[in-house]
Image (cartoon, rainbow, N blue to C red):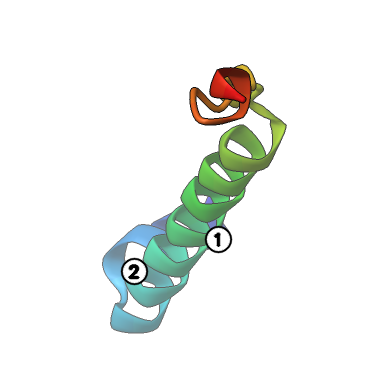
Amino acid sequence: MRLLQELFTTDVGLFSAVGIAFMLGMGVFFLRLFTRDDAPAAQPDPREGSR
């Protein structure tokens, strides 16, 4: 209980909590960024078909 009180009431604890939340948010962002599969399908070049 004392650790949670110190985490949310002191300056150092608040900086730590913000840093932990920021790093977790970055982890979620990068996980979603690198694992999504929304690459556009390969479109045939219209100039290639006119030969």
Question: Which image quadrant is residue 22 in?
Answer: bottom left
Q: Which residue is mark 1?
A: 3
Callout 2 amino acid: Leu
Q: Which residue is mark 2?
A: 14
Residue 27 in the image: state x and y as whole percent.
Answer: 61, 49
Q: Is residue 30 above or below residue 17?
A: above
> Furthest residue to the bottom?
12
Please, what secondary structure does the residue beneath circle 1 have? helix
Does residue 2 show up? no
Q: Which residue shows up at 49% across the image and 23% down it?
A: 46
Real-space CA distance between mark 2 and mark 1, rounded to the nearest whole angstrom = 12 Å
Q: Which residue shows up at 39% across the image and 82% down it?
A: 12
In the image, 48 versus 31, the foreground residue is: 48
Residue 5 in the image: state x and y as whole percent.
Answer: 41, 57
Residue 36 in the image: state x and y as whole percent.
Answer: 63, 26
In the image, 8 versus 41, the foreground residue is: 41
Does residue 12 show up? yes
Q: Is residue 43 above or below residue 2?
A: above
Q: Which residue shows up at 45% across the image and 53% down it?
A: 21
